[in-house]
Image (cartoon, rainbow, N blue to C red):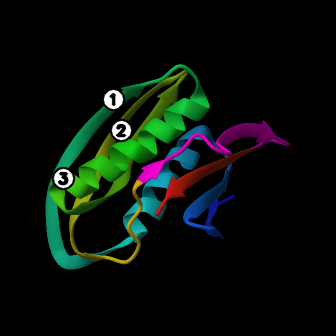
């Protein structure tokens, strides 16, 4: 089954809701949501980026992941999607593909711990992370 993700408006925040079969698909879907907030230049590919993160637990890893994507996007003016992502325990490694961004449709500022959750229910993963806009 394909990952399911959506943005849910939440006052001055945006709640990202993700449903997926695997934990890796949750993290990959989060990257696609962040990348979709920017309009990319056609053909404007940038070098791939390697990322490694560790956190105290998996929900914190998800928040750190979104914040890392936001940081990279801001610094490099690029949108990042996963070419490869692996989550083992509370450690994430990923190779990201970057595309130069022409303009940002939504300005995500930072992931918060408010309402942060990730759980395995009925054989699927469900995650939620609220992002300041």
Determine the image quadrant of residue 119: top right
Check if mark 2's residue and mark 1's residue have beta carbons within 8 Å.
yes
For the residue pair 18 and 60, the one nearer the viewer reads as 60
Dot label at residue 52: 1
Residue at 49%, 57% in the rendered image? 132
Residue at 16%, 56% in the rendered image? 76
Check the picture and name the quadrant holding the N terminus. Answer: bottom right
Task: Residue under label 2, please give it.
Answer: 94
Task: Residue under label 3, please give it.
Answer: 75
| Residue 120 colored in magenta in the image | yes
Q: Earlier in the sequence, mark 2 or mark 1?
A: 1
Q: In this view, does 31 lie to the left or right of 68?
A: right
Q: How crowded is mark 2: few (under 14 residues within 10 Å), some or many (20 or more)?
A: many
Residue at 82%, 41% in the rendered image? 121
Q: Which of marks 2 and 3 is nearer the N terminus?
A: 3
Q: Provide the residue span drawn in magenta.
A: 110-124
Disc 2 element: strand
User: In front of the other: label 1 or label 3?
Assistant: 3
Disc 3 element: helix
Residue at 23%, 62% in the rendered image? 78
């Amino acid at each position: 089954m394909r990952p399911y993700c959506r943005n849910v408006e939440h006052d001055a925040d945006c709640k990202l809701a993700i449903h997926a079969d695997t934990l890796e698909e949750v993290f990959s879907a989060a990257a696609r949501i962040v990348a979709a907030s920017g309009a990319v230049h056609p053909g404007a590919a940038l070098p791939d980026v390697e990322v490694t993160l560790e956190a105290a637990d998996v929900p914190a890893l998800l928040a750190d992941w979104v914040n890392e994507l936001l940081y990279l996007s801001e610094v490099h003016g690029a949108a990042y999607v996963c070419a490869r992502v692996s989550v083992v325990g509370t450690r994430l490694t990923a190779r990201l593909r970057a595309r130069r961004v022409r303009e940002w449709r939504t300005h995500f500022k930072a992931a918060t711990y408010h309402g942060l959750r990730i759980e395995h229910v009925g054989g699927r993963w469900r995650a939620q992370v609220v992002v300041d806009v």
